[in-house]
Every structure is written in C-alpha cells, then in structure tokens.
C-alpha cells in the first residue's frame, strides 16, 4: 500500500453535469439514457491513473426509483465500470445514503443486486452514521468471500456528521461491524479535510480520504467548483503522507484532478515515506462531569426546580426566585428553552446569569427547533466556558400552525441526534468538562411501552438521567414508578403545582398528555388566592407521595412564576427525606 496506494476516481455527478448541462434529472439514469457519455467518463478516470472506479449508483435506490429501473441501472453501471476498469482498476459497488428513516433492508438489497453481478468490493459513502448499515456489512461478511468494505462518512470541518456523531467514534463502530477501511468524503474541501486527517490516528484507522474539490458556488443557476487540480493534488498527497491508505475525489473533482494527484504521489522523493500518525487530536472521553453531593437517584434524591426564562430585560424577579428556591433546599435550577414555541431569552445565557448570581448549579434546556448544528454547538461551547455542566436535551415544541407561512421550523436534529451530538462533543472538545445529559420522558404517553423503548434509545445515545413530564393522575404515577424501576439511569418525577383554576383549565385542554382530575378542578373553582394555594399544594403533595418510592428525585415546574408554590414543595420533599432518615 505504501508504494502502491489505492487511488479512486473523482466525482461522476458534477463532472457529468459539466459535460451534458442540457440533460436534467438524476445522473444515475445516465447509465441507460446516455451510456456513451458515462463510458467516456469512466475511461477518462482510468486513463488519468485511477486504480479504483465507483459505479454510477450513488443515489440509486427503490425509494427514488422503481425496482425495475434500479435493477436495470445497477446492471448497466456495473458493466460500464467493469469494461472501463479492465485489468487496470478495481470496481467498487457505490452505495450512497438512502432517504428514509429505516433503510437497513434497502442496503442489504443493494448489496445482493451487486453480488449477483459478481461484485466483491463495496463503498458505502457519504454516511451519517453506521446504525442502518450493520445488516449489509454482516451479509457481505457471511456470503461474499474476500470482500472489501469501505465505510466513508460525510463530516463538517470539525469532524462531526450532520447527525451529531464524531468521525472517530463512527470509525470504531464501522470497523467493529466489519468494515475494512473507514474514511471521509464530501462536505469538506481538501484543506479542511487535511486538517482533520492530521488529528486522526492513522496507525489505528485504515483511512480513505475523498474530499470535494473545494466549496461550491452557484453561477447562472448551476453549482460549480473552482478549477484547482494542482492545489487539490498537493493537499490530498499530504493526506497520503499522513497515513491515508486510499485517496480520491468527491464533488467537483474531474479526471484532471485525479491525473495531477497520481503525478504528485509518483513525484514524492523516496525519503518522504508515508508515515502513520499515532497521536490523535480527538481526545478520549474520561467520564461524565462530577455531580454535586445529591444527584437524581442518589441515596438522598436531588430536587430540581424549573423557573421560566426571561421574556424581557428585567432580571430581578427571576434572580430573587432562584435565590428563594436555593434557600428552600433545592439542588438545581432549570431553565426551559422557549416552551410552546414562545420566544424567550436564550436558556444558556439565562442559566449562566442565575448560576453566577446564586452559586448553585443550573441546568438549561436545549431544543432543536430554533437551531442548526452550528448554533447548537455555539450555545454548548458558550455554556461550558461559563461553567454550565448539565443540559436537558429535547426536540422542542413545533411552531404554531398560524406561524408556518412566514416562519420556519429548523429541526436539524431530533432529541436522539442532539443527545448523541452532545455525547460526541464530550469525547472531543468537552473531554475535560463534559456535560451530563438529561432527557425527557413522557409518562403521560398513550403507549407507554413505546415511550420506554424511546427512553432506552436515548440512554444508548448518551442520556444520563430523565426528567418526566408532570405526574397528574394515578396512571402517570404508575408509569413513572415503572420507568424508575426498569430504566438503567435515574428518572426524576415531574411535579407541577397548578397556579389556579384558569391555569388548570389551560393545562387540561391545551397541553397534550395532561389530565387534571375533575374533583381538583371543582375545588379550584371560585377559590381565593390563599385557598387556591392550599388546594394546589395539597394535591401536589399527594402526587409526590404517590411516586416517592421511585427514588429518582424530583423535577418541579414552577407555574406562572409562582416560586412560593415550588418552594413549599421543595421543603415538603426535604421533610419527607429527613423523616425517612429518622425512621431508619
């Protein structure tokens, strides 16, 4: 390998578009609609010196084309690549990402189609994760002797996929699942990918690199890349010298890019031998951050109290409430992230303010609705710098329907992706000060078995504890106790005292999953403020009693800024804990 690197071809789709701009539609169909041009492109790459050819099947799957078309195009693409390769190059069945939530069987089917044609080499490229490829890898290992598998991931300049996973973590999973080579392709230009490769331990990872030619521009409605074959060749040759075993190109690269790359590698003087770096710039995670004396599920369960984020610039009430809650005996303050899609102050900035002022740990909520991956990472870095060590990771409430005409949801992540992303960052830039990630559990779900499966998935993604939605009924209390017993991480019971009759009606009629008993509503009707507090606290205390045996701690949600209600419940829980201690 050191003397004879595997050199892949470059891009087909962008190069084909530059040759045949008049042809619109998927480039995968060109193998049957414009076979002559596809054959010409394949031959050009071989003549340029490529020793490995990809089939023109990147986007070919039965979710975008009918089965008959997929079969015909697979066969034609294999024949074209095999004919062009001859004895000069290996042919790799190219399998790109499939646009569906559960594509496992689609990947297996693609492997079977290629195997029937004689394929033994497989490139799974532009991957976001490994979860859905394991079955395909297992099929190859079991049924195709001597097969070669490359798993190549699309990552941003900091080494993360759009799903929030760190590239080296994905490399480990892919190799364990049966891949022979792991690597990077697409998204990054050659300079940024070279920087990433310099941080990867190439003595540990058999690495493939296929960067884009650079970053695209749109000219007259067409996506174009800078014409930079010499520059591209220099950067990719650097990656080869850093230990990459397979090199090639992705979007924007042409036969000329590959020709210059081959020339550059051949021109390397003998004394510049390829060296594997054994120093990784991606730190290994050392465990979750230290927690205070009390933690959820500990012998003396922790209590967290949620205070609403700011809706204006007046901070006095929030800070006074936080100090009061601290003095009542709470262990944490939590700050929600614009619940019900109503704009409020940034939860991380608010958490930092409260933490600095009160001296107690604050847990901001982080939702996916209003942020892409860049904004999420920015908030996490800012919070970590300011001493925030805990975060509640949630998907977030969608925008109200009437807002959707001019205002768009973001949702680049869901809660699973977000938890996984934070866990990945804990292995990387937060390795010395990692976040403890808390997830949400809906104990009011109609199908609680399914909700528990969701919770197990969140634990696998990196959740270290759960905050439950509010307990409001015997059924939700029963679900909480079941979750506390069955899940492997602590579950804090959600308790929400109602602020009054109107608040109870709103929760009952407008917030999904909450059902306040009729007798409580009747008691709240026509009450004075003092009587309302008595009824609300009395009912909340019965709910606390009903879930106390779960032992996971408590998450108290303050209604409409009434911190005195939450403070009274904190004191009640502390008294119950002290009573248990005295009875031992």
Image (cartoon, helix red, strand yellow):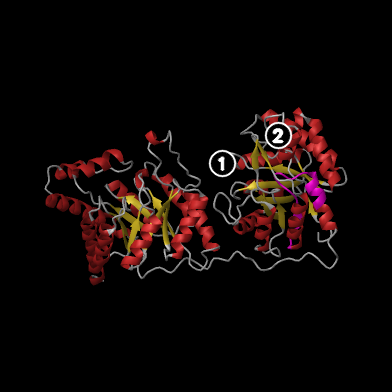
Judging depth in this view, the residue of 535 and 449 nearest the camera is 535
Q: Nearer the viewer, residue 47 or 316?
A: 316
Q: Residues within 10 Å of mark 1 (few under 14, many from 20)?
A: few
Q: Is residue 362 above or below residue 93?
A: below
Q: Residue 106, how many percent across, how many down?
A: 63, 39
Side of 405 where 529 appears, left or right = left
Helix, strand or loop status at disc 1: loop
- Dividing the image into 4 quarters, which one contains the C terminus? bottom left
Q: Which quadrant holds the N terminus? A: bottom right
Q: Residue furthest right?
A: 87
User: Can residue 461 be seen in the rendering of this structure?
Assistant: no
Quick one: label 2, few (<14), some, or many (20+) residues within 10 Å? many
Task: Look at the image and give the residue range highlighted in magenta.
Answer: 242-260
Position of residue 170 measured from the top left corner of the image (x, y, whole percent)? 61, 55
- The residue nearer to you, when weighing 507 against 564, is 564
Q: Position of residue 508 (x, y in %)?
A: 26, 41
Front-most of 403 and 467?
A: 403
User: Residue 389: within the magenta?
Assistant: no
Image mark for residue 102: 1
Mark nearer the N terminus (1 vs 2): 2
Residue bearing mark 2: 27
């Amino acid at each position: 390998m050191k003397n004879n690197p595997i050199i892949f071809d470059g891009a087909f789709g962008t190069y084909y578009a530059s040759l045949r701009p008049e042809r619109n539609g998927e480039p995968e169909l060109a193998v049957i609609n414009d076979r002559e041009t596809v054959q010409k492109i394949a031959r050009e790459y071989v003549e340029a010196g490529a020793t490995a050819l990809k089939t023109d099947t990147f986007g070919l799957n039965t979710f975008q084309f009918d089965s008959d078309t997929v079969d015909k195009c697979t066969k034609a693409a294999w024949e074209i690549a095999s004919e062009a390769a001859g004895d000069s190059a290996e042919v790799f069945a190219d399998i790109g990402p499939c646009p569906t939530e559960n594509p496992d069987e689609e990947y297996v089917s693609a492997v079977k189609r290629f195997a029937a044609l004689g394929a033994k080499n497989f490139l799974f490229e532009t991957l976001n994760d490994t979860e859905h490829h394991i079955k395909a890898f297992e099929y190859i290992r079991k049924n195709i002797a001597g097969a070669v598998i490359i798993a190549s991931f699309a990552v941003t300049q900091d080494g993360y996929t759009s799903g929030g996973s760190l590239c080296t973590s994905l490399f480990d999973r892919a190799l364990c699942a049966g891949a022979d080579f792991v690597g990077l392709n697409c998204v990054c230009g050659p300079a940024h990918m070279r920087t990433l490769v310099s941080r990867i331990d190439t003595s540990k990872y058999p690495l493939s690199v296929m960067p884009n030619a650079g970053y695209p521009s749109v000219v007259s409605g067409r996506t174009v890349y800078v014409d930079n074959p010499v520059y591209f060749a220099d950067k990719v040759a650097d990656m080869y010298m850093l230990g990459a075993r397979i090199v090639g190109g992705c979007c924007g690269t042409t036969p000329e890019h590959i020709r210059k790359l081959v020339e550059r590698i051949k021109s390397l003087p003998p004394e510049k031998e390829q060296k594997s770096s054994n120093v990784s710039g991606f730190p290994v995670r050392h465990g979750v951050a230290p927690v205070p004396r009390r933690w959820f599920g500990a012998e003396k369960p922790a209590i967290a109290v949620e205070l609403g984020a700011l809706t204006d610039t007046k901070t006095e009430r929030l800070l006074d409430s936080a100090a009061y809650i601290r003095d009542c005996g709470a262990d944490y303050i939590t700050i929600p992230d614009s619940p019900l899609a109503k704009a409020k102050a940034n939860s991380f900035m608010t958490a930092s303010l409260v933490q600095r002022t009160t001296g107690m740990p604050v847990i901001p909520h982080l939702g996916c609705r209003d942020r892409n991956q860049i904004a999420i990472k920015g908030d996490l870095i800012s919070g970590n710098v300011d001493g925030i060590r805990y975060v509640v990771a949630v998907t977030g409430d969608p925008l109200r329907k009437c807002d959707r005409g001019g205002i768009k949801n973001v949702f680049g992540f869901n809660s699973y992706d977000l938890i996984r992303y934070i866990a990945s960052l804990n292995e990387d830039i937060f390795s010395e000060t990692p976040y403890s990630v808390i997830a949400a559990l809906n104990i009011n779900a109609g199908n609680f078995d399914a909700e528990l499966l969701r919770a197990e998935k969140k634990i696998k993604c990196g959740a270290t504890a759960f905050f439950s939605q509010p307990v409001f009924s015997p059924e939700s209390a029963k679900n909480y106790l079941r979750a506390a017993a069955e899940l492997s991480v602590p579950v804090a019971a959600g308790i929400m005292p109602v602020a009054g009759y109107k608040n109870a009606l709103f929760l009952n009629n407008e917030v999904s999953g909450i059902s306040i008993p009729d007798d409580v509503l009747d008691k709240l009707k026509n009450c004075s403020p003092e009587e309302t507090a008595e009824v609300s606290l009395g009912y909340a205390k019965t709910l606390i009693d009903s879930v106390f045996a779960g032992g996971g701690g408590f998450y108290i949600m303050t209604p409409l800024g009434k911190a005195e209600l939450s403070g009274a419940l904190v004191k009640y829980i502390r008294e119950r804990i002290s009573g248990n201690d005295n009875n031992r």
